Amino acid sequence: MKEIIQKNIEDSKIQIKKELTKDLLIIFLTRIVEDIEKNVDNFKWRYLEIKQLLNPYSSIQKISFDDKFGMEISEQEKKYLQIFLESLNEDYQIKNANVVKGRLKKAIEKLCENYLPHSSQIVEPIILAKMLGAMAGIKNFSRKPASTIQLIGAEKALQRHIIMKKDSPKYGLLYKSKFLQSEKDKGKTARKLANKLAITIKQDYFQNFPDDETLTAMC
C-alpha cells in the first residue's frame, strides 16, 4: 500500500513538473523588471517565487538548479536567473537596479525569440512578455480572440467604460509599441497587431508548448 501511495505521489510530481513551462520563466523575469520600474525595494517574494519553480518540494532556503522535480532550464537560462539572484543583498534588495533591469530585458528578448519566435516579430519582446504575464501564461493567451488581445492592459479603462459609460479603450499594452506610436490611427493599427498576434501566439503555443491536451487536439 505504501509503495502505491509513493508511486502516486511521484507520478503527481512528474505531472506537476510538466506544467512548469518556459512561459513562466519569461513572466517571472518580466515581473522583476516591472518591480524595478515601480521602485520596489524588497524582492524576497520574488526570490521565493522562483524557488517554488525550481525547488517546489524543498524546505532548504538556498536555490538549487538541479532539482529533478523543478523547472528544467538550460545553462543559458540559468545565467539569466543568476542576473537576478546574484544582484540580491542579504535584505533581498537589488544592487544596481538599472543595470539589472537592462540585462534582464535582454534576457527576456532572447527567451521570447526562442519560445515565442512568431509573436516576437509582431511586437517588441518586452511588451509581448508583459502581455503574457497579464494573461497568466501562453495557454490562456493563445485562446483569446483578437478583440481581447487588443485590450490587454486596458482592463481598468474597460471597466470605467462599462460602469461609467466612458469612451471604450482602443488599446492596452500595445500602445507602447513603436509600431503603434508611429501611426496616426493608433486604434486601427492596434487592431491589426492584435489580429496578427491572435494567429502567431497560437503558432508559438502549439510549436513550443505542447501538452497532453494540445497533442490530443492535433491528432
Image (cartoon, rainbow, N blue to C red):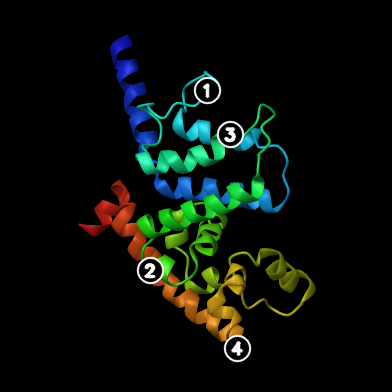
Residue 70 sits above or below residue 149 on the image: above
Q: Amino acid at mark 2?
A: Thr
- Secondary structure found at label 4: loop
Residue in the picture at 62% in, 34% down: 88
Disc on the earlier residue, 2 or 1: 1
Quickly name the residue at label 1.
62
Q: Position of residue 194 (x, y in %)?
A: 49, 74
Q: Position of residue 158 (x, y in %)?
A: 68, 70
Q: Quadrant of the C terminus?
A: bottom left
Q: Could you tell me how far apart the alpha carbons at marks 4 and 2 are, in whole angstroms? A: 23 Å
Q: Which mark is residue 47?
A: 3
Q: Earlier in the sequence, mark 1 or mark 4?
A: 1
Label 3 neighbour load within 10 Å: few <14, some 14-19, many 20+: some
The CA distance from mark 2 to mark 3 is: 32 Å
User: Mark 3 touching mark 4, by CB under 8 A?
Assistant: no
Give the amino acid type for the residue marked by disc 3 in the picture. Answer: Tyr
- Residue beneath the point at 46% across and 23% down: 57
Disc 2 versus disc 1: nearer the observer: 1
Q: Nearer the viewer, mark 2 or mark 3?
A: 3
Between 22 and 140, the residue placed more toward the observer is 22
The N terminus appears in which quarter of the rendering?
top left
Mark 2 or mark 3: name the one nearer the start of the chain. Answer: 3
For the residues labelled 3 and 4, the Cα–Cα distance comes to 42 Å
Position in image of residue 80 (x %, y %): 46, 43
Is residue 1 shown to the viewer in this render? no
